[in-house]
Image (spheres, rainbow, N blue to C red):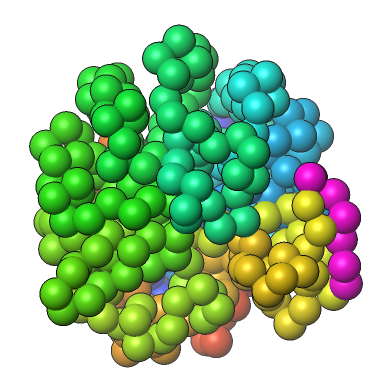
Amino acid sequence: MADRKLVANGHLMRVGEQWPIGWILVENGQIIEIEAGNAPRLDDVQMIDASGHYMVPGFIDMHAHGAAGYSTLDGTRESLCMIAQHYATHGTTAFLPTLETASSEQTMAALKAVADMLGKSTGGAAILGAHLEGPYFNPAKSGAQDSLYIRRADRAEAEAFMDTGVVRLIALAPEYPENQWLIEEASRRGIVVAAGHTVAGAEDIAKAVRLGLRQATHTFNAMVGLHHRNPGTVGAVMAERAIYCELIADGHHVHPVAMEVLVRAKGLDRVIIITDAVPEAGLPEGVYNGHGRTVVVKEDRIQMTDGTLAGAACMMDHNLRQIMAAAKLSLAEAWPLTSLNAATQLGIDNRKGKLAEGYDADLVLLDQNYHVALTMVGGHTVFKA
């Protein structure tokens, strides 16, 4: 018997339009019908009353390391499920478990764990693949990454990582000639390549784009800033139309004015909101020793003992509210930055990132203050406030 649900009486957000009242019919995890107006009377369906809440596509987080005390680098099913379940409470329906710089052995073990979870239920957000943030960085911009493991791209190692078939995004420093072969090879395999933890200048970025670079890792952070006589990494990625710019829109990593500048420079279709959430996200305030470092959690901010930001505590729903306020956007303008743009970049916008017939039933209900009331992943309610 078909599993059918009818989500009705919601303010429905669509690409280029919004319906004050609309409904969505879900069958076996997919949207099979979507219309404006009052819902029809149907038999054999589970009714979900949206109660006038906003109905938006589920958030897709391309850059997320962990939460609730668990890390992608733990390399376990339990950790990945606990992370996914925490994210779902904040509206994330799909994500790329993200690996920071580590040893080759730990990285490979974590990639295999992610591969084992592809297509399987986590009880929360779905796993789309892995994001390899490092280890091929510039140590001058290591940030909270462990500089002990930063290295240039060894062909045998990098190919072994990619051969797992689970890597969807690789961040690297494109200024190093030793890393440039990897831009081409990863692009050939359909893996998105991003410039991150880098001192690349405008010429370096232009060359990397010709090789296949298509994204900037947490724009503004761990890269050379914009100066009117030296555009740096920031100016270069803002100017290159081919590049999508990640943005940690938590209000700590980037000033609100800079967030607005980025949105105005790139346009609404080239900014991807991320969390960069780390294992301490979701934990009470305090000092934590684990995952190879000591960090302080205070007032939704996570930092090293020297004050260096060490990833983020805030989730996608918070960041949506922040970018709306900073860039003076309506929800209709802002929601694609949390889902559609990531889906487009990953090449899955034919099934995720929109509320449309034939798409996966990944959706979020937001109340009038844009807080999450319900999260649905593949037609299953995984969180309800």
Identify the residue at horizontal 24%, vertical 44% (top origin).
214
Residue 226 locus on image (x, y percent)? 25, 73
Residue 332 quadrant:
bottom left
Quadrant of the image for the C terminus? bottom right
Residue 239 in the image: state x and y as whole percent. 14, 63
Along the line of sight, which residue is nearer the eye, 54 or 348? 348
Whether 374 is drawn above or below 66: the answer is: below
Residue at the location (72% across, 65% down)? 304
Question: Does the magenta-highlighted stretch encompass residue 221?
Answer: no
Q: Is residue 174 above or below residue 89?
A: above
Judged by its main secondary structure, the magenta piece is strand
Residue 3's quadrant in the figure?
top right
Write the residue at 11% across / 37% down.
210
Q: Is residue 289 magenta?
A: yes
Q: Is residue 264 visible?
A: yes
Above or below, 128 relative to 229: above
x and y percentages locating residue 23 in the rendered image: 41, 63
Tell me if I can see residue 194 in this picture.
no
Total numbered circles: 0
Relative side of 107 to 85, left or right = left
Q: Nearer the viewer, residue 175 or 35?
A: 175
Residue 191 location, x and y as percent? 34, 29
Identify the magenta region: 286-292
Q: Quadrant of the N terminus?
A: top right
